[in-house]
Amino acid sequence: AQSVTQPDIHITVSEGASLELRCNYSYGATPYLFWYVQSPGQGLQLLLKYFSGDTLVQGIKGFEAEFKRSQSSFNLRKPSVHWSDAAEYFCAVGQNNNDMRFGAGTRLTVKP
Amino acid sequence: DAGITQSPRHKVTETGTPVTLRCHQTENHRYMYWYRQDPGHGLRLIHYSYGVKDTDKGEVSDGYSVSRSKTEDFLLTLESATSSQTSVYFCAISPPPGQGLGYGYTFGSGTRLTVV
């Protein structure tokens, strides 16, 4: 069965520190992979996506993610976190318009 | 979010009453979706539509119905609201398969529904 796992429910990092949010998936073939960000009271905004080509993808707001087929992972990274990055982050996978699966989310807190 | 509007933004309703949430898009996208968001569950698909009058069930469709009479509007109805349907509901849109899922979804700002 298709599934998406975000192992970390909540992560706290200091402003200026690096960040890595984990995402693992279970799928029959390599799916499309996405990271979304949700600020409080808002909808989800697409940060970046991967479906083929270079396994390191760049997104908005200075985020990047690396697809590792052997580990079925698509981890999100940022070299230096800003206080405005505090939000909830969702990994999502899918192959068609009707089978997108979302992880449970990781809430990021940024300490001053 | 630009191009997609949900109404109302907040609603409190009583158990057993019907409730309709509206999603309106100006992007002319073929696909529209209703999700619910609950702590610890991420987003779960309720129903989706792949065209006018063409809809299908998602993984948590029990107790919900949808209608799409126009490209731009996708309605979600809770036929008889229960406390377990207290949630935040999101509408999303995406281009058709020919344009690739690579575009991802565009989400509305959500409707917070409380059933008392």
Image (cartoon, coloured by chain):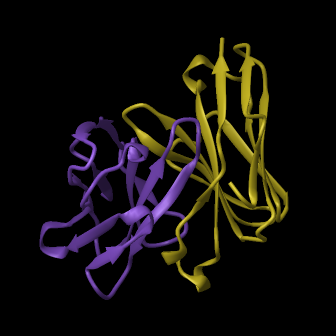
Chain colours: A purple, B yellow
Residue drawn at (36%, 44%) of the image: A105
Image height of B34 relative to B3, above or below: above
Q: Residue at x 76, y 69 (%)?
A: B27
Instruction: Where is residue B105? Give x, y as percent.
Output: 57, 63
Of residue B30 and residue A40, the one placed in the foreground of this image is: A40
Instruction: Locate the N terminus of chain A by quadrant.
Output: bottom left
- Residue at 62% in and 39% down: B89
Give the image location of residue B78, x and y in percent: 71, 32
Quadrant of the rendered image containing residue B94: bottom right
The residue at the far left in this view is A70
**Residue at image location 70% in from the left, 59% down from the top:** B55
Which quadrant would residue B41 be assigned to in this image? Answer: top left
Question: Quick one: B101 or A86, which is closer to the camera?
Answer: A86
Q: Nearer the viewer, residue A23 or B83?
A: A23
Q: Seen from this angle, which residue lies furthest bottom? A: A53
Q: In the current view of this chain or complex, which residue is farthest to the right?
A: B70
Q: In the rendered image, is residue A102 in sight?
A: yes
Circle count: 0
Query: Can the viewer see residue A30 in this picture?
Result: no
Q: Where B81 falls versus B15 (above or below)?
A: below
Image position, residue B57 (x, y; %): 60, 52
* B64 sits left or right of A18 in the view: right
Q: In the image, is B18 to the left or to the right of A89? A: right
Image location (x, y in percent) of residue B90? 62, 45
Q: Quadrant of the C terminus of chain A?
A: top left
